[in-house]
Amino acid sequence: MVVPTLAADDALSDCLRSLENQTIERFEVIVVDNSGAHRVKAGNARVRVIGNDRNLGFGAAVNQGIRASEAPYVATLNDDAVADPRWLEKLIGAAEARPGAGMFASEVRFADTGMLDSAGMLIAIDGSSKQRGHLEPPADYATTQAALCPSGSAAVYRRKMLDEIGLFDEDFFLYCEDTDLGLRARWAGWECAYVPGAVVEHRYSHSAGRATPLKAYFVERNRKYVAIKNFPWPNLAWVECAAMVRYFWHAVAMIEGRGKSAEYRKAGHSVGMLIFLVFRAHFAAQLRFFRFWRKRRRIVLTRRIDSKEFRRILAAHSISLRRVAEL
């Protein structure tokens, strides 16, 4: 179990208390403190702390925890999430019953409303990813079913799969690294299962903010990283045209007061700054294009399914560009 933390505040304490109450006993908690201040102290024998001198990002922090463990399953949990006592029991039970699946998505609920935050992930044709079931009632996702990949906020990964495909891509730093890992796993033939009843309550974007310039930049840059690394040629060719369509729907949603773009404006951030961040994200992605192209080549050389099957998976777990803008 890896819990990365940046804030290292009372929310982390609530998270760790919820892990003390799990119905299964044989697991270890590794807290990776990215605060740079070494504020986190191990509260009991089950908890180990890895302290970093600076914020290394989500992926690097989780990778530190994975490398420090030898468990056959690796759980990731955000520091602002509180796990139901049967959370791990449900996920590990699903993993034991499904040897062909390497990823398991939790029933992530908003702490304040009880509505779903995530029941796995969906992906749009421009590389943007969004939470499946977001803002919908949990009862609408009451059965164990296939998902594209889990949200890294609350997931279990099979160690055998991680040994095969590699860990989180640390170049992402923040956001979308769970989507990238999930797509690499799908190329390698691994499946993902959504597990209802594996409940966590999530204080959404507690560390990085709900709609901030920081988030806008990394999400826009990293969806391009996801596409460059993982999309088959026919899909990759349409990515930038699709992004222009999404920008249009973001503008519409902003005018109508819906979605992250409207939330961004309500937080007092300017449209001009948002446009600048989009251009900056595109420029940053172009600078690293060949770095990510080499990573793409490694995926192609080790894949176990063909492009036709991968496109079918993307289509089965897709979300429209308009819906991306509205959420």
Image (spheres, rainbow, N blue to C red):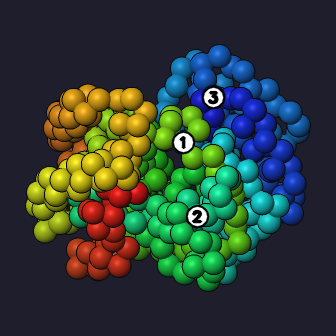
| Residue count near mark 1 (Cα–Cα under 10 Å), binned few <14, some 14–19, many ≥20 | few
- The residue under label 3 is which amino acid type? Ala
> At 58% across and 64% down in the image, what residue appears?
116
Quarter-wise, where is residue 212 in the image? top left
Which type of secondary structure does the marked residue at label 1 adopt? loop
- The residue under label 1 is which amino acid type? Ser
Which x, y percent locates residue 183?
A: 37, 62
Nearest the eye: 133 or 124: 133
From this viewpoint, is residue 226 visible? no
Q: Compared to 74, does 286 lie above or below?
A: above
Which type of secondary structure does the marked residue at label 2 adopt? strand
Q: Which mark is residue 205?
A: 1
Q: Name the residue carrying label 3.
A: 7
Q: Name the residue carrying label 2.
A: 116
Q: Are marks 1 and 2 in contact (CB under 8 Å)?
A: no
Give the mark nearer the N terminus: 1 vs 3: 3
> At 58% across and 77% down in the image, what residue appears?
141
Cα distance between the residues tagged 1 and 2: 14 Å
